Amino acid sequence: VETIGGLKNSENDFFAYAGSGSQPVMAAFDLIGWRDIGISSTVFLRWLYTDIPPPGVLSPRELRFLENATSFKIWISRDQNFTERSFQTVLSDSLTPLPVDPATGVQAYKYTLVGFEREPYYFRIEAQNTAGVGPVSEISNLVTETCTQNEFLQTHLPESNVTCAPCP
């Protein structure tokens, strides 16, 4: 037996190896976030993900050891460089799956996060499994408050302070 990591046993030996598959090779993509009108403490995220890479990325041998993502790590930051960030790990089973694109096999996921302040946030996603962590996604859009009809978004302020204010 030989693992993807190169561990081998001889004919009469055996070994146990947890997580003998490979870590995710694909990054989540098309990550967007939003908030409902007047409810700044809740953020909704939607992203696309597939465990299967395009042809030619992995050899047939490597494809045999490919493990599905079992969780996603959500990066949360107030700045686009993620200099200060927090994380939340979400099991795949707790995500809301949206329809799979039959042509590409790409799965869309939705997840709801709570406990946010009014200020805007950025997000990134990493797929994880027992073998490790995959590549990190691109940065989401800036997720700001969604103002009511009697408010306006203060886009004239620095990005980290963009919040809703009453209309003059």
Image (cartoon, grey):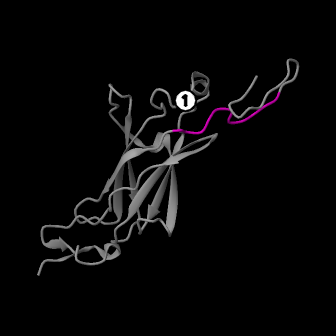
**Direction from residue 137 to residue 129 in the image, left or right:** right
Circle 1 packing at 10 Å, graded few (<14), some (14-19), many (20+), is: some
Q: Position of residue 82 (x, y in %)?
A: 47, 65
Name the residue tied to disc 1: 58
- Find out whether residue 6 is within the magenta segment: no
Q: Position of residue 44 (x, y in %)?
A: 34, 54
**Direction from residue 36 to residue 117 in the image, left or right:** right
- Find out whether residue 24 is within the magenta segment: yes
- Above or below, 114 relative to 130: below
Check the image and name the residue furthest to the front: 56
Quarter where residue 105 is shown: top left
User: Which residue corresponds to the image point at 57% horizontal and 32% vertical from the top-left?
Assistant: 67
Location of the C terminus (image quadrant) = bottom left
Check the image and name the residue furthest to the right: 12
Q: Position of residue 20 (x, y in %)?
A: 69, 32
Location of the N terminus (image quadrant) = top right
Amino acid type for the residue under numbered disc 1: Leu
User: Which residue corresponds to the image point at 23% horizontal and 64% vertical from the top-left?
Assistant: 146
User: Which residue corresponds to the image point at 51% horizontal and 56% vertical from the top-left?
Assistant: 88
Q: Secondary structure at mark 1?
A: loop
Range of the magenta residues? 15-25
- Above or below, 89 relative to 148: above
Q: Position of residue 148 (x, y in %)?
A: 17, 67
Q: Depth check: give the residue in front, 73 or 5.
A: 5
- Above or below, 56 relative to 28: above
Quarter where residue 37 is shown: bottom left
User: Which residue corresponds to the image point at 41% horizontal and 68% vertical from the top-left?
Assistant: 79
